Amino acid sequence: MVVRTVPGEASVALSDEGEKLFAPSAERNLGPIADLLVQIAPKPSDGNAPRLRALEIASGTGQHVIGFAVCCGHLNWQPTDVDQARLSSINAYVADSGCTNISPALQLDATEAPWPDTIGKFDLIVLCNLLHLISIPEAQALIQGAATHLAPRGQFVIYGPFKRGGVLTSDGDHAFHSKLAAHDPEVGYKDDFDVMDWLQSNGLDMSEVIEMPANNLALVAMQKPG
Ligand SMILES: C[S@@+](CC[C@H](N)C(=O)[O-])C[C@H]1O[C@@H](n2cnc3c(N)ncnc32)[C@H](O)[C@@H]1O
């Protein structure tokens, strides 16, 4: 595993109480991402069908998965992260949430392909705010891992900042990308068309590209129907 560090504001996680970490950015973008998931999350075929499964890659503090589990209560959520402090934070949020549809956080290096078979298949996989913090080969390996673990017709949602057709489209994005690349030349914003190519070359069909607040994008891709 490559351990990458990021400049401060790329991954803010200040201690709040106990093991819980707090990221102001996660609080800001939870609402729009949750609204999107309500629209696109797979729905059970009938009332007796087993609960559908959702995986969050790089869950971070755990603030997101609590919100996702509330707005998409018909899904069983599996949070993951590579970092032990984040895993403890996620579990602390889950314990306080009262949510019964979230499993204990699993350690997963999403850039290490193949992912362990034991993790199983998911009807929804969500990734927020990681692709710009890893290298291109790591991003490709992550997409390969997610595609392999999507159930038939499963949806993969990638949210975050992107280059658009090779171009950084705001001053803020330009500054952030430059700061990331200066800190670690292997990381930085990925191009939206490259990511769509990687999704498609792993057998997924693009279903939607959605403009999100703060000049972010959500790319939604679907696994073939079995
Ligand atoms: C910027 S934070 C985003 C957290 C959360 N998804 C959000 O949007 O608030 C990036 C997260 O990715 C995790 N991470 C970094 N490299 C990873 C990897 N190779 N596999 C899984 N998670 C990773 C970090 O530990 C951190 O929690």
Image (spheres, grey):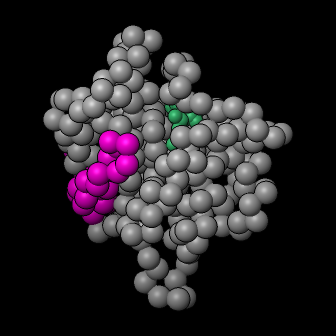
Q: Is residue 21 above or below residue 207?
A: above
How far across and down, in percent of the image, does residue 223 sit?
A: 31, 60
How far across and down, in percent of the image, does residue 190 sit?
A: 29, 31
Instruction: Name the residue located 37 percent from the left edge and 48 percent from the top edge.
Output: 213
Work out which residue is located at the far right of the displayed protein and give it: 18
Depth check: 140 or 28 in front? 28
What residue range appears in magenta? 201-224
Can residue 176 be seen in the rendering of this structure?
yes
Left or right, residue 96 beside residue 199: right
Q: Quadrant of residue 167?
A: top left
Q: Is residue 160 magenta?
A: no
Instruction: Name the residue located 39 percent from the left edge and 34 percent from the top edge.
Output: 131
Instruction: Indicate the quadrant containing the C terminus: top left, top right, bottom left or bottom right.
Output: bottom left
How far across and down, in percent of the image, does residue 225 sit?
A: 29, 69
Can residue 75 be seen in the rendering of this structure?
no
**Quadrant where ligand 1 appears:** top right
Q: Is residue 165 above or below residue 54?
A: above
Work out which residue is located at the far left of the displayed protein and give it: 165
Instruction: Name the residue located 18 percent from the left edge and 29 percent from the top edge.
Output: 166
Q: Quadrant of residue 59?
A: top right
Depth check: 221 or 30 in front? 30
Magenta region, mostly helix, strand or loop?
Answer: strand
Instruction: Name the residue located 32 percent from the left edge and 46 percent from the top edge.
Output: 217
Left or right, residue 66 beside residue 225: right
How far across and down, in percent of the image, does residue 200 sit?
A: 22, 48
Q: Quadrant of residue 83?
A: top right
Work out which residue is located at the far front of the displayed protein and give it: 171
Q: Is residue 214 magenta?
A: yes
Left or right, residue 24 beside residue 171: right
Left or right, residue 57 beside residue 226: right
